Image (cartoon, rainbow, N blue to C red):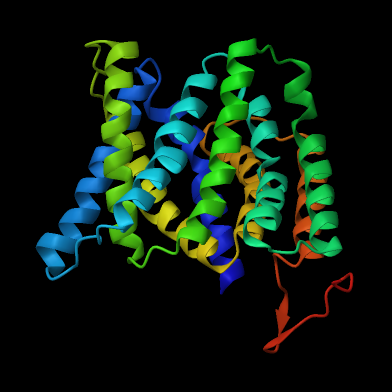
Amino acid sequence: MDTLIGLVFAFLWASGPIAAKVGFKGSPPLTILVARFFFAALIMLTLNYVIRRGSPLPRRGDWKHITVLALTNSTIYLGLCWLSLLQISAGILNLFISFNPFLVAIFSSIWLGRRVTRQEWLGMVVSLFGLLIAITPSLAESHASVAGVLMAITAVVTYAFGSVYFKWAKVDLSGTLLNGWQIAIGGIILLPFAAALNGPTLPTVTPNLVVGLSWSVIAISIIGIILWFYLLKKDPVRANMWMFLTPVFGYMQGAIVLGEAVHVTDIIGTVFVMLGLLVSGTIELRWWGKTETPLIPAD
């Protein structure tokens, strides 16, 4: 079940840039991101407090944890990622994001005392190698500014910190409640920055914008993040291993939706990424209800 959830999360998370290319072209990025946060929060909080009713408010001690999650997972990470794409290519951003599992493994071992096995380290290295093979062609033709690179690095480190913090905080709220409040707070914090950078500029409403924003709100900010919190509760190290698959799903979706070319290096890289996830134990193959023996014995 966790494998299926991880695959669905990676697929949905990878669709973010595709939705942006389809619907957000020429729109002020942070203004669109704030709109995405507010619409998602409105849907989830309405579901809990109007339709279901009886849902509890976060306890006093929960608010500080929710605010930290809002800052790390929403405001800083996504805000800087969207801004960095104005100055670096998606391939370079994906390269930085691919180091997220290593950062989470280090933070988890220091902060949570979660011992990372040799099998997991090897799996991460194999997956990273595959990702490098896949994105090398785009990296060779990419140009990047120092500011764009610094924003990408800050975003990835912040996201890794947020992943481990979530596991440590152990906020006792349902996925929809936690996600609704953290996205709402993330949007509120981001709003003044969007106003300062984008000014009064508003996007032109088009069918593509409606489709792209709707997908971003429902598939990514609601379903995707709820699945992400579920995976983080289980194990932040294994959860972040699924990040290796997002660039893979991304170019597959680009080929189907945008007609982008698929290269031989994409296919080879995908094979290595999947092999790394198998080696690490992130993906478990089950036959007739039994889990296969890991490729490499765990420590």
**Residue lying at 51% horizontally and 28% vertically, measured from the top left:** 81
Is 196 located above or below residue 237 in the figure? above
Q: Which quarter of the figure has residue 194?
A: top left
Q: Can residue 70 be spotted in the picture?
A: yes
Is 25 located above or below residue 294 in the figure? above
Residue 14, image x, y percentages: 54, 43
In the rendered structure, the answer to whether residue 63 lies left or right of residue 73 reads: left
Which of the pair 63/12 is nearer the observer? 63
Q: How many circles with numbers are drawn on the protein?
A: 0
**Residue lying at 36% horizontally and 35% vertically, measured from the top left:** 212
In the rendered structure, the answer to whether residue 36 lies left or right of residue 261 reads: left
Residue 13, image x, y percentages: 51, 46
**Residue lying at 76% horizontally and 61% vertically, measured from the top left:** 116
Which of the pair 120/128 is nearer the observer? 120
Q: Where's the C terminus, which quadrant?
A: bottom right
Which of the pair 18/32 is nearer the observer? 32
Is 146 located above or below residue 276 in the figure? above
Q: Can residue 254 be spotted in the picture?
A: no
In the rendered structure, the answer to whether residue 186 lies left or right of residue 227 reads: left
In the rendered structure, the answer to whether residue 88 lies left or right of residue 129 reads: left
**Residue lying at 82% horizontally and 36% vertically, measured from the top left:** 133
Residue 43, image x, y percentages: 21, 51
- Residue that lies at the very extreme toward the right in this rendered image: 296
Residue 6, image x, y percentages: 57, 61
Q: Which quarter of the figure has residue 134?
A: top right
Q: Where's the N terminus, which quadrant?
A: bottom right
Which of the pair 19/147 is nearer the observer? 147
Q: Which quarter of the figure has residue 285?
A: bottom right
